[in-house]
């Protein structure tokens, strides 16, 4: 489940950061940078872009701490900002240009992080996840890992609940096809009753 | 009939599904395997290792925090609107004073070789269609709203001039200049409306404006 749900930032630290205390700001970064960076990496994949977005997220958060009024968890507020930034990037013309470059094989030529893929299935799943189209990958991550509801995802994408459900189903069908090519892509087409 | 992936995901997540899907998935090997795979994949996704942000990230963030804040989007929008209106007004002024009229060679009959008015009319219609497709925000900002009103008034003045072009004895070159100005004003209006949308954080529709 989402790592964000376990993170608690003491109110005193938030107050310190609001007052401009550098140590308090660093404490917030230390508490949340790993889950924020992981979330962004899962959505946008490219490390360089993810690092830039990570900076954008924390600069926005630390400059606008006064906007967090204690309704809901602080980590949840941070997560919503990170998701919003990552999805804005995916909608941008800049991202569409990168997609074109990815199609040319630039992303495939990047070495994988050495810290990743402790087990073989981890590596396979990482690769399969990265091969999904950006929207499908984002939706499968937001729903299956971060625990977003279809209605929330639909709102984030400006689409219907049905769109979210279809994209999630498609993402799982593609993942299964990539992980077990012999099974083929499962579809909703009617088949003879198995009884 | 086998269960679809959407139904199996709902079943996995404990969402409401038809009773026949539950019965079938319990009996059908293919569907029960697919359901198990969906659950396993979700579990494995949750167990994937996280990523460590680069160590330099905090230093970069601290540096950015020490820099002055960039101008907020609404201020940028208002500034853009003011610039565009200024440009449009300057164009109007230059045209009305005659400085912007294309000099015609002596004896040429003051008629351009190519009549571009139909193209400019078509471009006007194209931009107007784009403008119709842009929703207005529920809450308008005073600066942007004033800019939009100003541009629309200028366009209305041009429309009056164009509608009485024959009576006023405007030649083709002058009509062409009026239509050019109308396209420029419409472009300015489109830019202000885009700025307005951006300032409100609304997502813009995907419209190719590169050639406008």
Image (cartoon, coloured by chain):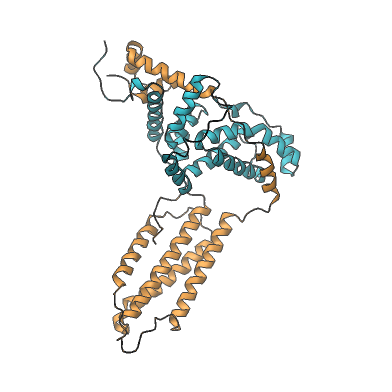
Chain colours: A cyan, B orange
Q: Is residue A113 above or below residue A53?
A: above
Task: Return the residue found at the far bottom.
Answer: B107
Quarter of the figure with residue A192: top left
Q: Is residue B125 above or below residue B2?
A: below
Observer able to see residue B180: yes
Residue placed at 50% from the left, 53% from the top? B198
Quarter of the figure with residue A168: top left
Task: Return the residue found at the far left.
Answer: A192
Q: Is residue B102 above or below residue A13?
A: below
Q: Is residue A47 above or below residue B5?
A: below
Estimate the x, y position of residue B131 in percent, counting from the top left: 39, 59
Counting labels gives 0
Estimate the x, y position of residue B5 in percent, counting from the top left: 36, 24
B66 and A150: which is toward the camera: B66
Estimate the x, y position of residue A23 in percent, counting from the top left: 75, 38
Residue placed at 57% from the left, 32% from the top? A38
Q: Quadrant of the C terminus of chain B?
A: bottom left
Q: Quadrant of the N terminus of chain B?
A: top left
A107 and B45: which is toward the camera: A107
Estimate the x, y position of residue B191 in percent, counting from the top left: 46, 61
A20 and A36: which is toward the camera: A36
Left or right of A191 in this view: A7 = right
Left or right of B47 in this view: A162 = left
Observer able to see residue B16: no
């Amino acid at each position: 489940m989402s790592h964000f749900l376990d993170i608690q930032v003491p109110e005193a630290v938030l107050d310190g950061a609001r007052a401009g205390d550098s140590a308090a700001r660093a404490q917030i970064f230390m508490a949340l940078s790993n889950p924020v960076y992981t979330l962004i990496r899962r959505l946008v994949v490219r490390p360089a872009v993810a690092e830039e977005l990570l900076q954008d997220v924390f600069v926005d958060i630390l400059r606008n701490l006064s906007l967090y009024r204690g309704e809901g968890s602080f980590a949840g507020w941070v997560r919503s900002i990170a998701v919003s930034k990552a999805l804005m990037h995916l909608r941008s013309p800049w991202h569409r240009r990168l997609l074109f470059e990815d199609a040319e094989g630039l992303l495939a030529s990047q070495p994988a992080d050495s810290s990743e893929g402790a087990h073989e299935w981890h590596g396979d799943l990482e690769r399969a996840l990265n091969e999904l189209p950006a929207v499908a990958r984002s939706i499968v991550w937001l729903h299956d890992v971060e625990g977003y509801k279809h209605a929330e995802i639909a709102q984030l994408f400006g689409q219907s609940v049905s769109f979210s459900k279809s994209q999630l189903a498609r993402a799982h069908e593609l993942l299964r096809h990539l992980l077990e090519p012999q099974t083929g892509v499962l579809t909703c087409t009617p088949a003879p009753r198995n009884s | 009939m086998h269960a679809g992936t959407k139904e199996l995901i709902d079943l996995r997540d404990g969402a409401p599904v038809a009773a026949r899907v539950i019965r079938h998935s319990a009996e059908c090997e293919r569907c029960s395997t697919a359901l198990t795979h969906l659950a396993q994949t979700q579990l494995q996704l949750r167990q994937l290792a996280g990523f460590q942000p680069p160590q330099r990230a905090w230093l970069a963030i601290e540096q950015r925090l020490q820099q002055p804040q960039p101008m907020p989007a609404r201020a940028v929008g208002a500034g853009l609107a003011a610039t565009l209106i200024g440009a449009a007004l300057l164009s109007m002024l230059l045209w009305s004073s005659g400085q912007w009229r294309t000099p015609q060679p002596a004896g040429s009959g003051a008629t351009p070789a190519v009549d571009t008015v139909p193209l400019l009319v078509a471009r006007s219609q194209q931009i107007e269609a784009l403008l119709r497709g842009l929703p207005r925000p529920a809450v308008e900002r005073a600066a942007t709203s004033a800019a939009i009103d100003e541009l629309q008034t200028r366009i209305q003045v041009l429309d009056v001039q164009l509608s009485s072009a024959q009576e006023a004895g405007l030649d083709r070159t002058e009509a062409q200049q009026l239509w050019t100005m109308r396209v420029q004003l419409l472009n300015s209006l489109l830019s202000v409306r885009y700025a307005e949308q951006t300032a409100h954080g609304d997502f813009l529709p995907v419209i190719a404006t590169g050639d406008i």
